[in-house]
């Protein structure tokens, strides 16, 4: 399959593979999520057309499932960020958080830092799909990055080891308060 690149704004690109990676060309070069490892070569080739991979300084994970963290090894100079809850779940139950033993091996080499609001990005706690799921609001361009909480026509699964089904409705309600012009979900379904 061919990876699709979409320029959402003059500073934000979307790379659509099995899951989506977003590149934010801000003062700090940021990625939201790192995609599924099955698309590693495509991501490497396509992201390199927009930015040198070594210039990516920050990767913010919307959650820590394998299909969103699978290419951390491509970004040698990046620091990695996730919610405090996602980091706690990962430390308690690495496999139950990531759901893939090969990715877990690679991922265990990196250091995770707790994410906070940064460069105009507001971090929103949206537990449901996983306890540590976050969405990210970029007020300036009215873009809502939702990870696997909300997609165009549906919501994320809530039957996984770190899911908290009882919190999903409240998270969706919370996101409905953000009047986005662009919805930027973790997958295109």
Image (cartoon, rainbow, N blue to C red):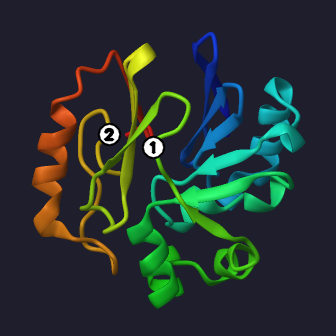
User: Are discs 1 and 2 less than 8 Å apart at CB?
Assistant: yes
In whole angstroms, how far apart are the C-alphas of marks 1 and 2? 7 Å
Res. 147 visible in picture: no
Residue beneath label 2, please?
151
Quick check: 97 above or below 148? below
Q: Secondary structure at mark 2?
A: loop
**Residue 136, position as x, y percentages in the image:** 41, 39
Quick check: 11 above or below 127? above
**Residue 61, position as x, y percentages in the image:** 53, 54
- Foreground residue, 121 or 40? 121
**Callout 1 crowding tier (Cα within 10 Å): few <14, some 14–19, many ≥20:** many
Q: Does 97 sit left or right of 165 as displayed?
A: right
At horizontal 38% and vertical 21% (from top left) the residue drawn is 139
Residue beneath label 1, please?
187
Res. 169 visible in picture: yes
Q: Secondary structure at mark 1?
A: loop
At horizontal 53% and vertical 38% (from top left) the residue drawn is 118
**Callout 2 crowding tier (Cα within 10 Å): few <14, some 14–19, many ≥20:** some
- Quadrant of the frame with the C terminus: top left
């Amino acid at each position: 399959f061919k990876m699709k690149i979409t320029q959402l704004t003059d500073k934000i690109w979307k790379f659509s593979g099995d899951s989506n990676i977003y590149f934010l060309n801000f003062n700090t070069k940021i990625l939201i999520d790192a995609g599924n490892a099955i698309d590693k070569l495509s991501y490497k080739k396509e992201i390199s057309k927009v930015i040198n991979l070594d210039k990516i300084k920050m990767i913010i994970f919307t959650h820590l499932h394998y299909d969103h963290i699978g290419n951390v090894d491509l970004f040698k100079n990046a620091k990695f960020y996730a919610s405090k809850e996602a980091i706690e779940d990962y430390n308690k139950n690495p496999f139950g958080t990531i759901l893939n033993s090969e990715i877990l091996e690679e991922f265990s080499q990196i250091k995770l830092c707790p994410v906070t609001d940064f460069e105009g990005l507001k971090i929103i706690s949206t537990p449901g799909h996983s306890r540590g799921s976050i969405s990210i609001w970029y007020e300036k361009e009215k873009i809502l990055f939702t990870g696997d909480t909300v997609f165009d026509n549906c919501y994320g699964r809530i039957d996984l080891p770190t899911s908290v089904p009882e919190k999903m409705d409240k998270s969706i309600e919370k996101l409905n308060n953000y009047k986005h012009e662009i919805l930027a979900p973790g997958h295109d379904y």
